[in-house]
Each structure stands twice: as structure tokens, then as C-alpha cells.
Amino acid sequence: DRLALQLDKSADMLAVIAGAIQAGIVFLPLNTAYTAAELDYFVSDAGAKCLISSPRAEPALIPIAKAAGAILRTLDTDGSGSFAALMAEMDGQFAPVACGRDTLAGLLYTSGTTGRSKGAMLSHGNLLSNAEVLKDYWRFTDRDVLLHALPVFHTHGLFVATNVALLAGCPMIFMPRFDTDAVIRHLPEATAMMGVPTFYTRLLDDPRLTRDLVGKMRLFVSGSAPLLAETHRQWEARTGHRILERYGMTETNMNTSNPYEGDRRAGTVGFPLPGVELNVCDEAGHALPKGEIGTIEVRGPNVFQGYWNMPEKTAEELRADGFFITGDLGRIDADGYVTIVGRGKDLIISGGFNVYPKEVELALDALPGVTESAVIGVPHPDFGEAVVAVVVAEPDAMLDVAGLRTSLGGTLAKFKQPKHIAIAADLPRNAMGKVQKNVLRQEFGGMFVPKP
């Protein structure tokens, strides 16, 4: 059975996931920003037997659950809701279901380049092996206190931060979301924090961030998006701490990490984690020499089992020998440090969340008056990358940017919606008719970057 969860962050949500794991149920943590239209696809594609949501979302989800044949229950952050009432009726007697390392544990949906989201199948072994490795590699013990301000529908917040802390037996300061004032208030109580680049840039903007404030801290981890070298430099100058950057994705959890002890090099994601094999390959899958740029492929106990009900897509990206073709472009230097130089899959990472341009383009192209669109990611000082859309109108159509934004609000989660929409007469194309997104990046690439 599959259990879909669209819940606000709370300890009760973690209890539901823990219960699902012990019962052998496959869980689907879903972004709270997803619209009803997006949820409809996830619930039906996964064949979810039950959907648990917040009470405020229940009215919009009743028809979705009914159409999918799923039971709908509610759970709020204060412990109320129909699912909470059901739990209260239980007698507390429970025998865990025996699960092996290869038993499916979770389905995490990741955007698809064709516009159709893919359900990455993660086993109990995938989740456990990654947590075990990270706990040891980053030296977590029960004496730590983790400041947790990440969402828990995401690999970073759930499988990295939460699972590592639970495995180490360390307390968490479990914040509902990142809030600068709250983080500043709790930092003196913590020894470790995991975040996305946006966390660090916003804290650097606050004069209360000092060495004394982080006096008990031993580790700051950043991931989900590239951290600028300047942010590294400013953070170390301000706090005396060097941020540890790592690299992972939904399909693999974590693949690499800068060293806990040793040189944490800005602009790199460190070395392959213990048990993880990483190659930089050409298009034929042959490993390239150090220093050359190619596609990153990884193999190890962290690598997923494939995509839910997508055998052809699985065969395209998961080789028979177990190597997963990440689609990310990178290189390995002479010292073994891995650097990510681009993404072959055209992925945009905005505020730590994955946005595939094709999905946004399909939503735009479906709107009245739109002939076509092109979506790109451009540098943004706060979000890492911002989504920018260039739209071409149908002949005689009068497109309105505000109207386009309103229409997208009902079909796309907020983090996927363009931060800038430009209306153009046409899109730049090469001789083969392919849209030249590199030309658009040159045109719009500096729009969010402060002028020197």
C-alpha cells in the first residue's frame, strides 16, 4: 500500500512516517506548495490507498481522493484532525512488519524533463545506508543538537537531516520553517545546522550573526543548490566556520561531501562518500580522465531502484551495472574533489527546490493567447537561481503578465512560478530550429545580480 502525505512540518508527521516504515507501507511525502492539480497526478499515479493532509486542504482534496479511490484523513500541527482521532482509538499494540534492505520504503516524486513527474523508488536499504554513512562522516552523536529548519517533504530535510539525527539519537530544534529571527534565537543552543544557500545569505544579512552567537556550533552543512564562493568567504570571516558543501539528489540521497576534517573547498562538493562509486563519463558511459568535464554517474547502496511504473525511463537512466546517469555535468580534479559545472537535464534549482523548465513551459503554453514559451534559470543572490519565462503571443493576442501569473497560480507550486515573465515577438533559434536558451541566458542573466 502507498500512503501519500501533504502535511505541515511537525513531530506528528514524523511519527506517521515512522509508523508507515514499521508497517511496511510505502510513503509519499508531498510538497505543501503543490496545487490540487499536481496532487491529483501524484495520488493517482502512485495508486495511493490513503491521503493525509492538513484540515485546511481537505475540501479541495475530497474529489481527488474520491477519484483515486483513496481514503482521506487530516492531521494538523497541533495534533488534531481525523487521523489523530483514529490514532487515539488504537490500543497501542503493534508488531512491526519485517522488511529487508531491498523492500520499497518511499516514493519521492521528482520533476520530469517531459513535464511528467517521476516517482523515485527508494528502499529501506537506500535510506538506512545513507544515514549510517553521513552520521559517521559528519561525526554526529547523541551529544549534538541539530537546528532543523528544512522542509521534511524533501530529501535534504527528511532523509539527510532528520534520519541522521534520529540514527545518532540527538535532539532536534524542529522549526516549522526557516525564519531568520527564530534561527538567530536558537543558534546558541545548537551544535549543527543543515541548510540551503538561502539560509546562509539571509543570516549574513543580519548583524546579529556573530562568532559568539555560534560559539557552540561545530558544523554548518549546505546543499540542494550551489553555494557561491563569496558566501563561503563571508561566512568564514563572520563566524570562523567553514561551510561544508555536499552533493545529492532525490534518486540517490547523498553522493559526495567535503571532508569533515581537511580542506573544504569552495566551488566543490568534495569526495564520493564511503561506499559510493562516482565516475565522470562521456556519452558512451566511459570514464574520463581527471580534469575533463562529463556526465556524473554514481553507483552504491544509496542509489534508488528505478522510477515507479516507468521501466523505459528507468532503463535510460539506470545502467545494468548499477550506475545511475545523473544528468549533472562535472569534473574531478587532481586531488579528487568533485565540481558540478552544469546540469545536462536543464534543471533549475531555486531556493533549494527543483524546477524543470519543461513543466513550466507546458503550463504556459496551455494558456489562452500563448504560442510558445522558453523557461530558463538565471543567477539570483538569494535563491541561487530564479525562474525566468519568455513568452510569445499568438497573432493579435494581448497578453498581460499579471494575467499569466494569476493563471499559473492554479497549476504550479509557487516555487515553480517565474520570478520574471517577458513577452517577446519570437524566440531565438539555431539553424535546426532549436530554441537557443544560451542567448536568453545572456540577455536575462544579470537581471537579479546587483550592479558593481
Image (cartoon, helix red, strand yellow):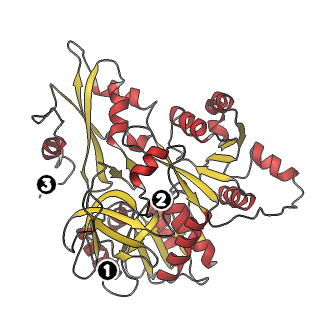
User: Image quadrant for the C terminus?
Assistant: bottom left
Q: Which residue is mark 1?
A: 264
Q: Which residue is mark 2?
A: 178
x and y percentages locating residue 349 in the rendered image: 34, 52
Q: CA distance from mark 3 to mark 1?
A: 29 Å
* Outermost residue toward the right in this view: 91
**Total numbered badges shown on the rendered structure:** 3
Residue 166 visible in the snapshot: yes
Quarter occupied by residue 429: top left
User: In the displayed structure, would residue 251 be above or below residue 66?
Assistant: below
Q: CA distance from mark 2 to mark 3?
A: 28 Å
User: In the displayed structure, would residue 291 be above or below residue 69?
Assistant: below
Q: Amino acid at mark 3?
A: Lys
Q: CA distance from mark 2 to mark 1?
A: 25 Å
Q: Amino acid at mark 2?
A: Phe
Quarter occupied by residue 21: bottom right
Name the residue at 20% across, 14% down. 395
Q: Which residue is mark 3?
A: 451
